[in-house]
Amino acid sequence: MSKVSIRELSYSYAGSPEPALSRVDLELPEKAIVVLFGPAGGGKTTLLRLVNRLNDLVEGAARSGEVLLDGEDVYAPGVDVTALRRRVGMVFALPLPLPGSIRDNVVYGPRLAGVRDRARLEELTERSLRQAALWEEVKDRLEASAFSLSGGQQQRLCIARSLSLEPEVLLLDEPTSGLDPISTAKVEESLLALKSSFTIVIVPHSVQQAARIADRTAFLLAGELVEVGEGQQVFTSPRDKRTEDYITGRFG
């Protein structure tokens, strides 16, 4: 069953001679990791940002097609964009902790949404940090500055901050691009555990990472969705020569 359905989605930035996305059709299944991979400029980040409407304020851009969340068009008139972004969280490549403590970072979203019950906030803090595989490392220093954490810990904190709003879909744009191999492995382990509860859509930082974690794989090239496959299929037996050429390093 698809959690998100992308239908005939096209998108162009003002002044760009070529579309960022061209008639993309893609199903994002529930409780799975969907990997979007391909060379820079292929439209991966644009596609992520369109799922929770982060591109709404981009001037002069043109969009057509549909993005359906549980069958409802997220671009339909009257959609509450704030509520949509609670359901569809996003984590960026660069960890961006907020000023304040580790605890403050995790409960920032719930507090903004009006949660005041201390027991509820404590529950969300522990659960979100456990889901992000960070609890055991920080449980005794929740009042410490978020900036005292390592880069890998900061990234997992940002994941925990998104999870505290109890989203249904989690979008990640190269979340391990600046991390060392050990931190990268910890983030990947947390994502593999999280997929039992969430739909995860990730732009990986390498083909190798894509192959390690994908339940479903989509290859984008110059705004076109070239190929989609289950799990390892795209990496082991690509159907399109362009996919094979990219995976084997002939370009990109």
Image (cartoon, grey):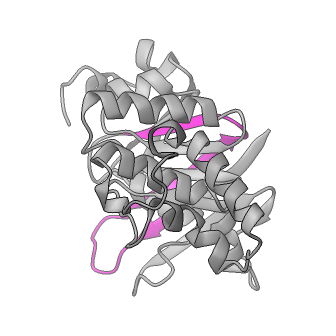
**For this rendering, which residue is in front, 41 or 3?**
3
Instruction: Identify the residue shown where x is 51% and y is 36%.
Output: 136
Instruction: Identify the residue shown where x is 56% and y is 21%.
Output: 231
Instruction: Identify the residue shown where x is 40% and y is 60%.
Output: 144
> Going by the image, does 100 lie left or right of 233?
left
159 to 113, vertically: above or below: above
**For this rendering, which residue is in front, 42 or 116?**
116
Image label count: 0
Q: Residue furthest top?
A: 236
> Going by the image, does 210 lie left or right of 32?
left
134 to 94, vertically: above or below: above
> Going by the image, does 208 lie left or right of 178?
right
Where residue 15 sits: x, y (%)?
Answer: 27, 79
Mark yes or no: residue 97 visible.
yes
186 to 138, vertically: above or below: above
Answer with the quarter of the image where residue 147 lies.
bottom left
Where residue 214 sits: x, y (%)?
Answer: 52, 28
What segment carries the magenta color? 11-37
**For this rendering, which residue is in front, 85 or 117?**
117
Where residue 175 sits: x, y (%)?
Answer: 38, 47
Where residue 237 sits: x, y (%)?
Answer: 45, 13
> Per the image, is 232 magenta?
no
Answer with the quarter of the image where residue 251 lies.
top left
Mark yes or no: residue 10 visible.
no
> Per the image, is 13 magenta?
yes
Quadrant assignment for the C terminus = top left
Quadrant assignment for the N terminus = top right
Instruction: Identify the residue shown where x is 45% and y is 52%.
Output: 141
Q: Residue furthest front?
A: 140
Answer with the quarter of the image where residue 14 lies.
bottom left
> Going by the image, does 174 lie left or right of 11?
left
